[in-house]
Image: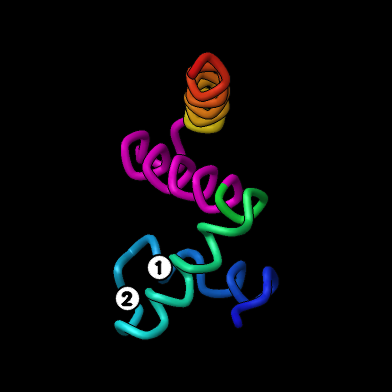
């Protein structure tokens, strides 16, 4: 059985589709039973998507502010669901 800390270590690989069949099944099984890990994976997925969407020139002085605003908006949107 996959433990929470094990899932946390492979969560980004799971989101990116880099796990084998058995690992994916273990993750999915764990997520069905653990609301904390479901929340963690959901938040990580949203963060990764935001970073991809908001990628900009790292020298851009507004970069960090735009990322913070996008994360805050995503969290507010999620809380409304």
The kind of secondary structure element at disc 2 is loop
Q: Main secondary structure of the magenta part?
A: helix
**Where on the picture, by quarter, is residue 9?**
bottom right
Apparent side of residue 56 relative to residue 62 in the rendered image (left or right): left
Q: Read off the residue under disc 2.
A: 18
Residue 74 is situated, as x and y percent measured from the top left of the image, at: 48, 25
The kind of secondary structure element at disc 1 is helix
The residue nearer to you, when weighing 52 against 12, is 12
Asked whether residue 22 is drawn in magenta, I would say: no
How many labels sit on residues? 2
Give the position of the N terminus as an image quadrant: bottom right
Taking the spot 55% from the left edge, 67% from the top edge, the residue there is: 30
Asked if marks 2 and 1 touch (Cβ < 8 Å), the reply is: yes
**Measured along the vertical axis of the image, is residue 50 above or below residue 42?**
above
Taking the spot 68% from the left edge, 69% from the top edge, the residue there is: 4
Q: CA distance from mark 2 to mark 1?
A: 6 Å
Q: Residues within 10 Å of mark 2 (few under 14, many from 20)?
A: few
The residue nearer to you, when weighing 72 against 23, is 23
Q: Read off the residue under disc 1.
A: 14
Residue 57 is situated, as x and y percent measured from the top left of the image, at: 37, 40
- Range shown magenta: 39-60
Taking the spot 63% from the left edge, 49% from the top edge, the residue there is: 35
């Amino acid at each position: 059985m996959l433990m929470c800390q094990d899932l946390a270590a492979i969560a980004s690989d799971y989101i990116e589709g880099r796990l084998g069949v058995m690992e994916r099944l273990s993750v999915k099984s764990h997520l069905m039973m653990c609301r904390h890990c479901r929340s963690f994976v959901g938040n990580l997925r949203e963060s990764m998507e935001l970073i991809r969407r908001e990628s900009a020139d790292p020298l851009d002085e507004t970069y960090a502010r735009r990322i913070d605003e996008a994360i805050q908006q995503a969290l507010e949107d999620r809380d409304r669901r």
